[in-house]
Image (spheres, coloured by chain):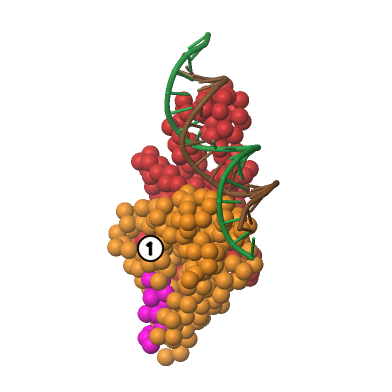
Chain colours: A orange, B red, C brown, D green
Amino acid sequence: MKSTGDRLVAAAAWLLDQGGQPAVTMRAVATAVDVSHNAPYKHFAGRTDLLAAVALLDYQALAERWRAIRDAVGEPRQQLLDAFEAIVAFSQAHPARYRLLFGTPDVAVRSDALDDAAETALHAFTDIVIDCQRAGALPSSPSHNLGIMLFATVHGLIDADASGRLRSRTGWADIRAGMGFVLDLIAQPSDPDA
Amino acid sequence: MKSTGDRLVAAAAWLLDQGGQPAVTMRAVATAVDVSHNAPYKHFAGRTDLLAAVALLDYQALAERWRAIRDAVGEPRQQLLDAFEAIVAFSQAHPARYRLLFGTPDVAVRSDALDDAAETALHAFTDIVIDCQRAGALPSSPSHNLGIMLFATVHGLIDADASGRLRSRTGWADIRAGMGFVLDLIAQPSDPDA
DNA sequence: ACCTGAACACCGTTCAAGT
DNA sequence: ACCTGAACACCGTTCAAGT
């Protein structure tokens, strides 16, 4: 049986999926777990802390997913496209939770543990970028710069898509098409080591 | 003398700058304008409508700014960097208002008028991209695709910077450095028409 | 037309108890 | 240790009046 704390986090995640941040009231979370409206305060300091707990789990799951993609067999370039696909899929299945992870925080959901988890996730992503560089599918710029630039671009396209400003302007069927466009733009025209 | 409606919009923008979305309560806006707590409802349907009015003005001002940059004398590539600089400066001076324009909306602030204004602003930005293409400073990909991709990337870097995950990972002094990196990555290695 | 005051149904959070 | 019930100071929004 899961602890009350765990059940509160799960309920908060579920409410985020159902109705976004506004739906995640402490009272609704408590009701979903069948405790009194203020029992959550015995497990979390407040609403911000509860949301941070949701974000922590999602960062960890995302890092895990990216590591699994990298460990699978396949071309690095395809693994990078799979990594894009993974984050795009998450952002579409759980928009409010995606925003909690990568959106500019309105209510600052920050902590050292959370920053570490975000760092670890971005590290798993960058590892795939590094594999692409080694395979000659991406230029040999500093990996951290290239990694954060590529992630910034998917993130930007995700936001543009979510706000409806992507499809109408570009003719791209989806964000995947956009990232293919980006990779083609920056791919080495020819492998200098070949 | 400005109308009460205009003064409410100005007060909302000011409150966004001071304390972000949470600070923009209808009551605080009303108090700032010295009217009763529900007078705003005689001018706007509700909080969402008031925020939309702020966003509309900001979209228009941004479009104006980008047009001015394009009309100034100078190299297209430098104008593009100036365009990046303009949006970065706005995001740093008015983070909550920037989020209102380009962040994924938690409370959907949307309307046809707002979509049009956003479209117009992105158009002004893309015009500068087109000038760069004509000057051979950017590849001749479809301009809409290139424009939205470049905007997505600045936006992503702005979010990464705002959440503190930029400087620590890349060593970039600021977002301007990041966009210089991006332009170098996708710039034509040599002008084929030269 | 434009504004006010009272009121309603919510919130997050705190406090004093209960078992 | 973990939970409950009452309470406080807020919200957005609505309604019935006022000028």
Q: Nearer the viewer, residue A165 or B40?
A: B40
Q: Position of residue A103 (x, y in %)?
A: 51, 58
Nearest the eye: B159 or A121: A121
Q: Is residue B75 above or below residue B71?
A: below
Against B26, residue B136 (above or below) is below
Is residue A91 within the magenta segment?
A: no
Query: Is residue A83 located in the magenta-colored stretch of the structure?
Result: yes
User: Could you tell whether B47 is left or right of B174 in the image?
Assistant: left
**What residue did someone put label 1 on?**
A93
Q: Please provide percent x and percent y for residue B172.
A: 62, 67
Question: Looking at the image, which residue is at 48% across and 86% down?
Answer: A134
What residue is at 48 percent from the left and 58 percent from the top?
A33
Please identify the quarter of the rendering in which residue B28 is found.
top right
Residue kind at label 1, given as amino acid type: Ala
Q: Secondary structure at mark 1?
A: helix
Residue range corresponding to the magenta coloring: A73-85
Q: Residue at x 42, y 77 (%)?
A: A80
Q: Identify which residue, A122 or A15, lies in the foreground.
A: A15
Compared across the picture, whether A13 is left or right of A119 comes to left
Number of on-image labels: 1
Horizontal and vertical percent for residue A39?
57, 55
Disc 1 sits on a residue from what chain? Answer: A
